[in-house]
Image: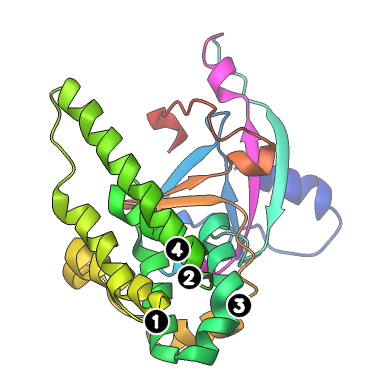
Amino acid sequence: MLLVAVLETSVFAGLAIPPLRIKPARGVDLPDLDLGVKSPSENYCTSEPFFSAYERLLGSEFDAVVLLTDYQDAKKQPPLRLSIIRWHYLTKSQMADEGLCRLAKKHREWLLSQNEAWTQKVFRFLAFVNQSDWRAKKIVKLIDLIQDEGRISKEIATAEGDFENKNKQRAREDKPLIPDSEIEALRRILTIRPVHLGVIDAADNWVVEAQKDLGRFPNDNEWHRLLSSPLDGSIGMSFALQWRYNFGKLFGAREDDPVVIDPLDE
């Protein structure tokens, strides 16, 4: 509401336009401008309803202005006086996951030259992947190397070591072990020729097992957009019941910076 007040009294002053509407329930905060508004504080995160997993690659239906506030500090010194300390303007396609878009863009032309169905499987995996899942995170690394058979073998060997170390640590902490089936799924990649097909199969199998009926292929509209999208995502995105947008990279936060979630930031 404060942003709209500034726009109406300053930016659009003297223009014969009707008052701007605020309609976040419609999916876009300022429909007259086709503009969304994101206002993370210095935890860099906000959440929104989940519509399609392919938004992680395609981005939003509208541009967004991201307003970084000082809420985390200001809330400690009542009465609350909130300030905007930095901002970024993101286009529709930039409202997507930076890392996943990088992988999709890196391999899109090569995958399409091999097989369109393979491309759809890889893109489906990237849209639905949960990187807190041990096997899924390893498959993401293998997709990054999908055009280099030698490095795929080395990465699976590295995964073997990580599997053993993680389970030793879990055993010491009396936590459930990562099942043997998880590392077996990665070992199976090396039994398939060409090896890149083994990676694609592993990615496809993970979606089927983990996401079940949720893990659908892109519809015709989404697929055509994936083929032409700039794939220039600029933020981090994860999903459960809602999207969790992470704008830390926009504002120079390190990946190991602590993220403090406050319900008033939602």
Residue 77 falls left or right of residue 127: right
Give the quarter of the image for residue 83.
top right
Q: Nearer the viewer, residue 172 or 61?
A: 172
In this view, the residue in front, 205 or 51, is 205
Residue 65 highlighted magenta (yes or no):
yes
Q: Depth check: 142 or 85 in front? A: 142
Which range of residues does the magenta coloring cover? Answer: 56-77
Of the image marks 1 and 2, the number of the one nearer the N terminus:
2
Tell me whether circle 4 and circle 2 mark residues in contact (CB < 8 Å). Answer: yes
- Give the quarter of the figure containing the C terminus: top left
**In the drawing, does residue 245 fall left or right of residue 192?**
right
Where does label 2 land, which residue? Answer: 149
Q: Disc 3 marks which residue?
A: 229
Tell me the amino acid under the disc marked 2: Glu
- Circle 1 SS class: loop
Position of 12 with respect to 60 (left or right) is right
Could you tell which of marks 3 and 2 lies nearer the N-terminus?
A: 2
Residue 162: x %, y % from top left: 34, 41
Crowd band around label 4 with a 10 angstrom C-alpha radius: few (<14), some (14–19), many (20+): many
Q: Nearer the viewer, mark 4 or mark 3?
A: 4
Report the residue at 44% width, 90% height from top: 116
Q: In terms of secondary structure, where does tag 4 sit?
A: helix
Alpha carbons under labels 4 and 2: distance apart: 5 Å
Kind of residue sitting beneath label 4: Ile
Q: Are marks 1 and 3 in contact (CB under 8 Å)?
A: no
What's the residue type where badge 1 is placed? Pro
The label on residue 152 is 4
**Mark nearer the N terminus (4 vs 1):** 4
Per the image, the residue denoted by label 1 is 194
Assign a secondary structure to mark 2.
helix
Specify whether 137 is left or right of 15: left
